[in-house]
């Protein structure tokens, strides 16, 4: 994806490969990488939201009794809710919404990290 001459590179490796096959390979790799990055986002959000729900249940069940515990619980709830919102609403830098174009450099970066 990062090779600006991907088609030529693949045809040098395999002269029998067609342009349609190269396009299909590139499209398939992009689809897998986008799916994997989105799945990772869902997994991270699920972990944070599960922790948030657990903490909310603890508060609802009377697990927070004194003022110091309440202040700590409120701070923890705010942090977890904020983290969940950040994960769910983070911008995907590899996709330019207005032009609907994809920058493979940013996609590879997000996929790797």
Image (tube, rainbow, N blue to C red):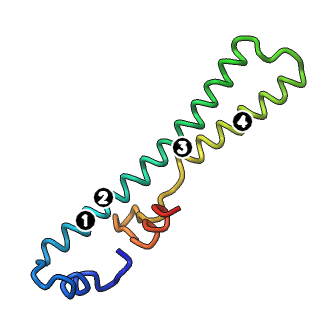
Look at mark 2 in the image and give the residue it sits on.
Answer: 31
Tag on residue 44? 3
Q: Position of residue 18 (x, y in %)?
A: 11, 78
Q: Position of residue 85 (x, y in %)?
A: 59, 42
**Residue at point 72%, 35% (across, down):** 78
Q: Where 98 falls versus 75 (above or below)?
A: below
- Which quadrant holds the N terminus? bottom left
Q: CA distance from mark 2 to mark 1?
A: 6 Å
Q: Are marks 3 and 2 in contact (CB under 8 Å)?
A: no
Look at the numbered disc 3 and give the secondary structure of its residue: helix
Where residue 33 appears, x then y in whole percent?
37, 59
Is 1 left or right of 86, judged from the image as shown?
A: left
Place of residue 29 in the rendered image (x, y in percent of width and height, measured from the top left): 30, 64
Measured Cα–Cα span from mark 1 to mark 3: 26 Å
Task: Give the mark nearest the N terminus, 4 or 1.
Answer: 1
Whole-number angstrom distance, CA of label 4 to CA of label 1:
40 Å
Please say if the residues under marks 2 and 4 sit with CB atoms less than 8 Å apart: no
Is the Cβ of the residue at disc 2 closer than 8 Å to that at disc 1?
yes
Quick one: SS at disc 2? Answer: helix
Looking at the picture, tell me which residue is in the foreground, 100 or 59: 59
Residue at numbered disc 1: 27
Q: Which mark is residue 78?
A: 4
Work out whether mark 3 precedes mark 2 in sequence or the reverse, and give the earlier one: 2
């Amino acid at each position: 994806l990062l090779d600006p001459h991907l088609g030529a590179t693949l045809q040098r490796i395999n002269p029998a490969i067609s342009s349609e096959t190269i396009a299909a390979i590139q499209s398939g790799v992009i689809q897998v990488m986008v799916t994997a990055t989105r799945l990772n986002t869902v997994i991270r959000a699920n972990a944070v939201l599960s922790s948030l729900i657990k903490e909310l249940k603890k508060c609802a069940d009377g697990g927070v009794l004194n003022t110091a515990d309440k202040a700590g619980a409120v701070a923890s709830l705010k942090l977890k809710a904020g983290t969940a919102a950040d994960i769910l609403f983070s911008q995907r830098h590899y996709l330019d919404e207005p032009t609907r174009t994809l920058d493979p450099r940013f996609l590879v970066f997000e996929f790797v990290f």
